[in-house]
């Protein structure tokens, strides 16, 4: 958890109104007591009215509140739908992040705006998203961020199978399936792989260095050129 997120969580926990011990906060946030003491001190120095002391507990002055976030109806609908889409089709890590984000937004919205969240009648059913695909999405997203080479068995639409070693660049959702944009060492070229056709996915310790002609910007440039070519032929 990022430190900024942890500080926000501490404030939210203290807003409950009851005395919170450093031990309870540490267990909730899965950090050490010393980290809680340091974070609380930093919050106090920044002007957050936290009262109490180490060994006794902490509470937040009742007149303190975070400035409300002001959203109109359409903005709330967009945020809720976006979170629901992530929950339906994202990986496990992003699904949990979407849940946390919605809770944070609800916590600081005025009561009249908070009620509008339940009025959003836009949904994204995630029946096709299996635990295996969610797990692969987490692994591929982490590998792309850390620039780690991944190895997997792949089955093409015609049934042909192969082992691929690729440099993961980005993940794209096309309204029915996730694809991985990557530089393929086997083909020495860009390829897009459907995540649901991967098996035995392994993120290697080997790290790749982006090279000119093999980066995401190069991939996107090629895709745009191909799309423009199709328009010219139509």
Image: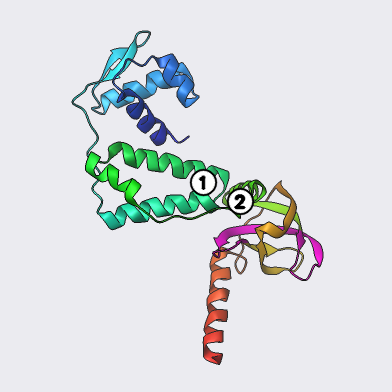
**Rendered location of residue 191, percent (x, y):** 67, 68
**Which one is nearer the viewer's eye here, 30 or 90?**
90
**Rendered location of residue 31, percent (x, y):** 49, 23
The kind of secondary structure the magenta stretch mainly shows is: strand
Q: Earlier in the sequence, mark 2 or mark 1?
A: 1
Q: CA distance from mark 2 to mark 1?
A: 9 Å
Question: In the rendered view, would you say 192 is above or below 147?
Answer: below
Q: Which residue is mark 1?
A: 94
Does the rendering let one see residue 219?
yes
**Which one is nearer the viewer's eye here, 197 or 27?**
197
Q: Which residue is mark 2?
A: 137
**Rendered location of residue 103, percent (x, y):** 38, 38
**Rendered location of residue 64, percent (x, y):** 21, 28
Q: Residue at 70% of width from left, 52% of height from top?
A: 150
Extreme-top residue of the structure: 55
Dot 2, how many residues are within 10 Å of its Cα: few (below 14), some (14-19), or many (20+)? many
For the C terminus, the quadrant is: bottom right
Q: Which residues are magenta?
A: 154-179
Q: Residue at 36% of width from left, 38% of height from top?
A: 104
Is residue 101 within the magenta segment?
A: no
What kind of element bears circle 2? Answer: helix
Dots 2, 1 in contact, CB < 8 A: yes
């Amino acid at each position: 958890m990022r430190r900024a997120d942890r500080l926000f969580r501490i404030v939210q926990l203290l807003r409950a109104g009851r005395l919170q011990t450093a031990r309870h906060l540490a267990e909730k946030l899965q950090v050490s007591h010393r980290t809680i003491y340091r974070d609380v001190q930093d919050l106090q120095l920044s002007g957050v009215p936290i009262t109490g002391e180490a060994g006794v507990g902490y509470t937040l002055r009742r007149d303190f509140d975070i400035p409300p976030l002001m959203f109109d109806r359409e903005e709330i609908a967009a945020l809720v739908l976006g979170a629901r889409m992530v929950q339906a089709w994202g990986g496990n890590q992003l699904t949990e992040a979407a849940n946390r984000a919605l809770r944070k937004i609800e916590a600081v919205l005025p009561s009249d705006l908070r009620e509008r969240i339940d009025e959003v009648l836009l949904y994204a059913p995630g029946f096709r998203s299996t635990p295996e695909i969610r797990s692969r999405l987490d692994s591929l997203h982490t590998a792309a961020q850390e620039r780690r080479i991944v190895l997997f068995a792949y089955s093409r639409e015609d049934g042909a199978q192969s082992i691929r070693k690729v440099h993961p660049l980005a993940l794209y959702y096309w309204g029915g399936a996730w694809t991985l944009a990557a530089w393929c060492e086997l083909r020495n070229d860009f390829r897009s792989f459907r995540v649901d056709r991967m098996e035995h996915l392994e993120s290697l310790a080997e790290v790749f260095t982006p090279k000119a002609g093999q980066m995401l910007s190069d991939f996107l440039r090629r895709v745009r050129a191909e799309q423009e070519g199709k328009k010219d032929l139509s």
